[in-house]
Image: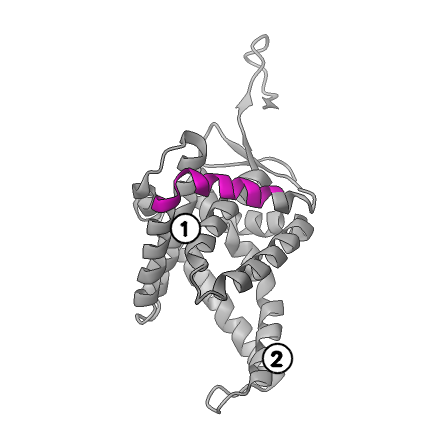
Amino acid sequence: MQPVSSNNSDQQIVIRVRPAKAAFDWFKDGLTIFSQHKLPWIGVTLSLYVLLLALSVIPVVGQIIGNILLAGLFPLAHTAFHTKQFDHKRVFDGFKQSLMPLIQVTLVNMIGVYICYELAAQITGFDQLATPNVNDVYQLSMVLLIFYAPILLAMLFAPALIILHKINVWQAIKMSFVGGFKNSISMTVFGVIMIFAMILAIMPAGLGLIFLLPIMHCTLYIIFQDIFHSRTPFKLESQPEDEDSMYV
């Protein structure tokens, strides 16, 4: 893919394809970010998820606020990774810098989830008014996952592209999908590891999630910065008027 210019004049983003084994490096680097500030990461992440549960009772608005807050974990991890400092105020960068674009992304995601759910319910014959059995819920979940997977790829890194690189909404959604699709093998390995980690974290009364959730968000940032490589264009000093650019 050709370099995509961000709204920052000194940045261009290149999508890189990473091998399957990169998933293990992602987790290692994500754990490193977490380990540098364990208690602050646990405190902020736990507070956000408790707040998300409280906001979930408010239709639409609560989900929008919750998603924007979660998106703020990307700039928080970005700061921790590059400066080794934990600046909890970066969680609110989404509200301060990219409020309207993040609202649009959230609404697109909500519409996508609704359409996928309706399609899955039609295909499986799921009746939400009836008392569901385990088999019905399992079939619905599997079909829903198949339909939602492409949307998930498009939504996963779009907030980070918007906040950190000032990419416009639709370009960010497109880049997120392309980046995830091109790295589908390594992302699948990451997903499988996360599923097993979630199972283990839930077993001790869910207490393992206190550690796994912040590690997961740190790792998502590592994946983002590894796949979406930012580089700076410059012109050759010997030909200052030349329109051709090179990149580092």
Q: Which mark is residue 139?
A: 2
- Residue displayed at 47% across by 54% down: 212
Residue 113: percent from left, percent from top: 50, 68
- Residue displayed at 67% across by 48% down: 182
Crowd class of label 1 (few under 14; some 14 to 19; many from 20; radius 10 Å): many
Give the color scheme: rainbow, by chain, secondary structure or one colour: one colour
**Considering depth in this image, is 76 or 31 the residue closer to the camera?**
31
In the rendered image of this protein, does residue 23 appear above or below residue 54? above
Q: Tell me if residue 240 is in the magenta stretch.
A: no
Q: Main secondary structure of the magenta part?
A: helix
The answer to whether any part of residue 166 appears in the image is no
Q: Quadrant of residue 48?
A: bottom left
Q: Quadrant of residue 15?
A: top right
- Taking 139 as reference, is 89 left or right? left
**Considering depth in this image, is 18 or 42 the residue closer to the camera?**
42
Q: Secondary structure at mark 2?
A: helix
Magenta segment, which residues? Answer: 25-40
Q: Secondary structure at mark 1?
A: helix
Crowd class of label 2 (few under 14; some 14 to 19; many from 20; radius 10 Å): some
**Considering depth in this image, is 120 or 85 the residue closer to the camera?**
85
Q: Amino acid at mark 1?
A: Ala
- First in sequence: mark 2 vs mark 1: 1
- Return the residue at label 1: 71
Q: Quadrant of the N terminus?
A: top right
For this orientation, the residue located farthest to the top is 238
Q: CA distance from mark 2 to mark 1?
A: 30 Å
For this orientation, the residue located farthest to the front is 204
Residue 203: percent from left, percent from top: 50, 66
**Considering depth in this image, is 149 or 31 the residue closer to the camera?**
31
Q: Amino acid at mark 2?
A: Gln
Q: Which mark is residue 126?
A: none
The answer to whether any part of residue 108 appears in the image is yes
